Image (cartoon, rainbow, N blue to C red):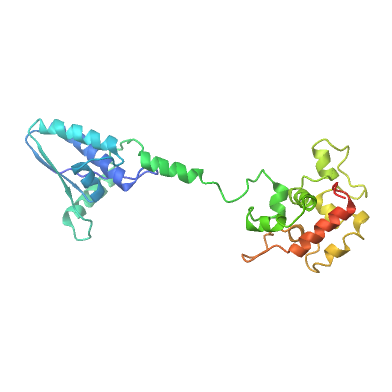
Amino acid sequence: MQYYICTTLSQKQNPFSAELAAVAHTLKTLVGLKDFRITLITSNKAAALTLKNPRQQSGQEFVCQSYKLMSRLQRHGNQISVRWVPTSEDNKLLGMAKEHARAATQENAISQVQVPKMKSTTLKIARAQAIPSRKLPEDIGRHSSRVDTALPGKHTRQLYDRLSWKEASVLAQLRTGMARLNGYLFRINAAETDQCACGQARETVDHFLFRCRKWTAHRTEMLQCTHTRRSNMSFFLGGKSPSDGQKWTPNLEAVRASIRFAIATGRLGAT
């Protein structure tokens, strides 16, 4: 009498646990036999060793279930042994098992059994899901992510480490968008309007740095840092723009010029 069990892995199982589950399920189907010699054959060496010498491996629930079923079968005169068969293309026994399993699949004769989740596999999945994503959430820090597509790292320390408290405060306002400009103050109910005093547009960081006519004379030095990126907020605030390559580094000269511009205007409360 021959039994063939086909195991299908789920995301919550691995080959080791699936094999142990298959062994337990097979033994359960054999309950009732008397005076048989039963050989459990598996190509999973870890599963075979665990069944022969169980210790503290994962899958203890399946091992305990298998041992209870083995004891029950042995009480009815059955002899049970476990044998490991290496996987190879020319192994006739494994080939036969696969053919029978494939035939059972085609005939819809598979018995689908819900097995418990493996603790080790469950923990592995949980750890993988707990690893923080290497990007900012879409609904957080829109201005910051627009200024700098790179996550805070060495370049951030490079920007702030040599700045005075006043300079660092100004740069932080410009990079986060939480600045003493009407666009932000109006949003937090600290100003009556979000319009710039020039009357041309909302007073945002972008408008303040590049477009407000009130500060045309003040931004001369800042614009001299480049001829091709004069409206690129990332360039002037030390951030990485989408077009920058892997070897990108912040232009500290442009960043310091932007800070000096902002301080000279007195608009951010740093005079």
Q: Is residue 81 left or right of residue 202?
A: left
Q: Nearer the viewer, residue 148 or 117?
A: 148
Q: Residue at x 36, y 37 (%)?
A: 117
Q: Position of residue 144 (x, y in %)?
A: 71, 50
Residue 239 visible in this rendered orientation of the protein: no
Q: Position of residue 203 (x, y in %)?
A: 85, 48
Q: Quadrant of residue 88?
A: bottom left
Residue sitting at x 82%, y 35%: 189
171 in relation to 250, above or below: above
- Is residue 46 at least partly visible in the picture? yes
State the residue lying farthest toward the bottom: 227
Rendered view: 226 above or below 22: below
Q: Residue at x 63, y 66 (%)?
A: 247
Whether residue 131 sits left or right of residue 184 in the image: it is left
Front residue of 172/33: it is 172
Q: How many marks?
A: 0
Residue 253 x/y as whole percent: 77, 64
Quadrant that contains the N terminus: top left
The residue nearer to you, when weighing 261 against 68, is 261
Q: Is residue 29 left or right of residue 140?
A: left
Residue 58 at what x, y percent from top left?
A: 31, 41
